[in-house]
Structure formats: structure tokens, C-alpha cells
Image (cartoon, grey):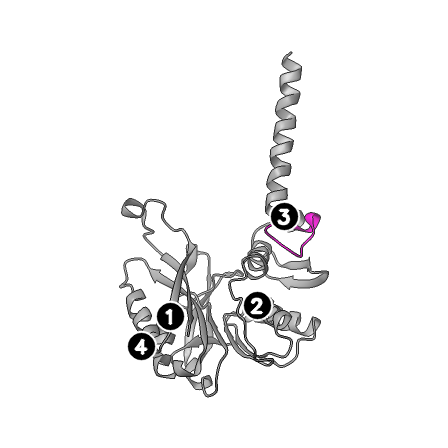
Amino acid sequence: MTQSVSQLKKLAIKFRNLLFWITNYQMYPGIGFRELHRIRTQTPYTAGTGRFMNKSFQYTDGLGFLGNIKELFKEECYFFETSNKTPFIIDCGAYIGLSIYYFKYRFPGAKILAFEADPSTFAVLNQNLTDHQLSNVEVHNRAVWNEETELVFYSGNSMSGSVMVDAGNKGTPIHVKTARLKNYLTQPVDFLKLDIEGAEVQVLRDIRDDLGQVERIFFEYHSVAHQPQALGELLEILTAAGFRYYIQEAKNYAKRPFTGLAQEGFDLQLNIFAMR
């Protein structure tokens, strides 16, 4: 009897693990079951190559690569429709280039201007663009900011590199050059993406008078612990520019906000979708 119970427990554990992998597998379209398992069990922040949609992509962090696939191709957070066959898209915080691949997958004729601050991540992005022969794409190894200057950037070999905070105190401080986004808003923009880890406040303040050029905006809003929050101000900027917005929680930093707010780094992260 004891042996039977033990065997049943082992079977239950195997079934639970199988159910976990099947559930997770469904969240990453375009990636094989074994490949998903291989990448998920790698040491965090380890660079490598993954198979996605029957193509090879380089990455700087396996879990970041999978998270990128989930948000782009499962959740489709940047999905939009347009009758323009050659939409102009500005991608700020292009990471390893999967967002560029997504835009080109949906709009082969798109013209894309992209920025990535982290030099090591930018090298991987460039390699992925070369490997997949993505044309009509202009990329800059710059941090998007409100002026042309040089800033300290906390590089973590992940999606969370930032000029604002050192997430988890794991980043390596390096100096990066910046690009003033305002200087690039000289023509109609079909889609503007700002995934710049806290710098969105300074950038949106700087481009508020140029938002008439932009048809749609996606940006991640971050607030930093113990610093003034600017969400209300940014929403007013969007409203004044004629946008209607939708807000979605991007990450749950506090299950019990009245007693459990983060005391360092970011304490709030939201996805803001703005359209006309």
C-alpha cells in the first residue's frame, strides 16, 4: 500500500510538471517545446541562440528572450492596423531586435528607426538584423533622451537596462551617448514606441509640442520609489495633443500596496496605449 501511494505521488508530480510545461508552451508561440525547456533551464543572464519561428535569433538573456516573444507574439502589445503599406515606426528601446522583426513581420514595407542604448545588446540587435536581412531599418546605439549628451547607463544584460535606476543593484554603470528624440519627429509617425525604462518622462515632456506628428504611441510608464510621480502630467500631455489613452498594468510590484510598496528602484510600471 505504501509503495502504491508513493508511486501515485510520483505520477502526480510528473503530471503537474507536464501540465506546467504545456501551459507555458502555449504562451510562447513559434518556439518548440524542447527549445522552450532548454532556454528556461539556462543560467539567468546567459547569452545564447534560440530557435523561434524556425529561425535562429541571438539573445543576451534567455528569459528575456522568452519574455520578449510572449509580449510581442502572444500578447501582441504593439499590434495596430493601418492602410499605409509603408508605415514609419520609431522603436525606442529596441533590445535585441525582436520588436523590429515583429513590425516587419506585420508590415514588410515599414520604415523603421530604432534606438538601443546598451552597446552589448546593440551588437546582438545588429547581428539579428543582418542574419534576417531586414531592410529599410535604421538603428542607433543611443539612449533616447531630451538632449544630445552623455549619461551613465546601468547595463544588466537584460531588458531592464536604464539611465534612471539600477534595477536590483545588478547593473554595470557605463557611459552612453544619447539622441534627442525631438530631432527625429520631423515627419508623420504611424507608431511611436517608448520602452526606455524610466526616461519616458523627460522625453515626453520634451516632445509634447511635436506629438501632432504621431498617430499612435505606446510607452511604458515607470515611477521611481520616493520620487515624485509624473503619470498625471504625462496623461495631460497626451490629452492636450488629442490622444485618447488606455492604461494596463505591466508589472505587479506590490500585492498589498498600502503596506508593500517597493522602497528602491521602480515602484510602478504601466503600459500606456494612446491613439487618435
- The image quadrant where one finds the N terminus is top right
| Mark in front: 2 vs 1 | 1
Q: What is the three-letter code of the residue carrying label 2?
A: Ser
Which label number is shown at residue 244?
Answer: 1
Boundaries of the magenta span: 26-36
Which label number is shown at residue 25?
Answer: 3
Tell whether 58 sits left or right of 164: right
| Mark in front: 2 vs 4 | 4
Which label number is shown at residue 99?
Answer: 2
**In the foreground, 210 or 115:** 210
| Magenta run includes residue 52 | no
Residue 261: x %, y % from top left: 32, 50
SS at badge 3: helix
How crowded pointer 3 is (Cα within 10 Å; few <14, some 14-19, many 20+) is rated as: some
How crowded pointer 1 is (Cα within 10 Å; few <14, some 14-19, many 20+) is rated as: some
SS at badge 2: helix
As measured in the structure, the alpha-carbon distance from the residue carrying label 3 to the one carrying label 4 is: 43 Å
Q: What is the three-letter code of the residue carrying label 4?
A: Ala
Q: What is the three-letter code of the residue carrying label 3?
A: Tyr
- Would you say the magenta stretch is mainly helix, strand or loop? loop
| Mark in front: 1 vs 3 | 1
Which label number is shown at residue 240?
Answer: 4
| Magenta run includes residue 31 | yes
As measured in the structure, the alpha-carbon distance from the residue carrying label 2 to the one carrying label 4 is: 29 Å
Q: Are marks 1 and 3 in contact (CB under 8 Å)?
A: no
